[in-house]
Image: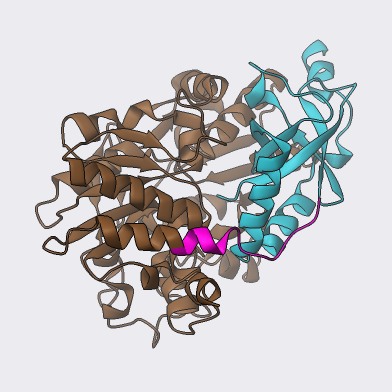
Amino acid sequence: MCLAIPGKIVELDPHNAHLAVVDVVGVRRRVDLGLLQDEPPVPGDWVLIHVGFAMSKISEADAADQMRTLTMLGETEAAMQEVRGYGLENEEPDQSSQRLKQ
Amino acid sequence: MKFVDEFRAPELVSKAGEEIRRLADPNRHYRIMEVCGGHTHAIYRFGLKDLLPSNVELIHGPGCPVCVLPMGRIDDGLSLATQPNFIFAAFGDMMRVPGTHGSPLEYKARGMDVRIVYSPADALKVARSNPERHVMFFAIGFETTAPSTALTLMRAKAEGLRNFSVFCNHVTIIPAIRAILDSPDMRLDGFVGPGHVSTVIGCRPYDWIAKDQGKPVVVSGFEPLDILQSIVMLLRQLRKGEARVENQYKRVVPWEGNRAALRAMGEVFELRPYFEWRGLGFISQSALKIRASYAQWDSEQRFSVPGVRVTDPKAAQCGEVLKGVLKPAQCKLFGNECTPEQPVGALMVSSEGSCAAYYNYEHRKPVTIASAAAN
């Protein structure tokens, strides 16, 4: 829960402006970008992820540092379990705006 | 990118250790608190104590959200969740935390619908897919996770999703530090400030610790070198008689924090007049409650909560350990009745709890950074 997991933004979700696909050591999941709305990341940017939300933009070198930190702390398994557990990958496109229209 | 398995710059780690020994006045005993549970975990895992002279003592702080949550809140949350058509969703860290009548996992074994989620957004998704049932997200954490809960509530409101609510246990770190500094049995010289909390709140909220209390604060990263460098920075200030807030973790922590995250928290939360912390008791304005404008999505405003207060099991001394008055192994239950496999107290559950960290690493003495640096 308190782990910061580094990931690379692969693509922005064309249907949901606040979601993006990130790659964390080969595992791809959707995360929420809403907490970075002041400086929205673009594909290729690296971010630190907390509980499914991108929390800060970082450099690639810092992302590598954070990976090493997780490894050193013996938390890689927990981090990957968390990332695999993010359930947003099957979300219907832009459900919220559909609901608002109803 | 791959995970890597080497320590960063072991020679620099040794140098930082030497610098600490050079800076520490042998006629003085330094008590430095690392506030964050992630730092506590790292300190034990890498055996950093072995690199410090005996007069530089690290005191473990209250920054483990699972550990500081009093049992009454767990009982309250679980009692709500025994209603029909209810789904109790929480982070995995919560699942083995004991309540009076069992942990969430034990409630699940008895047939209650308890689900692990890795994000509050996933709890919202469970609500969307189960429109006939109510999904309650049992939210815990400091400012690291509170913005995500806030944004999730904003999304629930925008969608008009009625079968979702949050049982909010979010706490804030500054009042806990104030309570510790006010405690008469606690003398501290400085603080290793939390890393990830500070990505949200920035470094300014620590100013009063330096200005009013005269104690230096260094916001720190989590690698052994980060923590040792932070201790070097603290000792340099102490040697010069200074007290400032410094940022060792500049590569991740902006001085001003994350404004968008703070805005989301401000939109959804307000301060509770007081909140109970395990070990520290009631601390005023130390926790977040959901604003009336989000009452529909607040489990406590929507349902009737018993408001249980329970004391910890008598023999367990979680409170004393949390305050840094006792070391984990000085608790009577440590390693006998209370182990990570069969935890009696919450400090043994979370990997960031000082008891679990002490049990896993100090007990077993794995290859530490100290020995790696020596080789």
- In the rendered image, is residue B86 in sight? no
Q: Which residues are magenta?
A: B1-14
- Foreground residue, B297 or B215? B215
The residue depicted at 30 percent of the width and 46 percent of the height is B234
- Determine whether, in the image, residue B49 is placed left or right of residue A55: left
- Which color is chain A depicted in? cyan
Q: Which chain is brown?
A: B
The residue depicted at 14 percent of the width and 50 percent of the height is B183
Q: How does the figure colour the protein chain or chains?
A: by chain
**Residue B48 on image: x %, y %:** 42, 67
Work out whether B42 lies above or below A94: below
**Residue B72 on image: x %, y %:** 36, 55
Quarter location, residue B153: top right
**Residue B203 on image: x %, y %:** 39, 30
Quadrant showing the C terminus of chain B: bottom right
Please say whether residue B358 is one of the residues in the magenta stretch: no
- Foreground residue, A69 or A85? A69
Please say whether residue B6 is one of the residues in the magenta stretch: yes
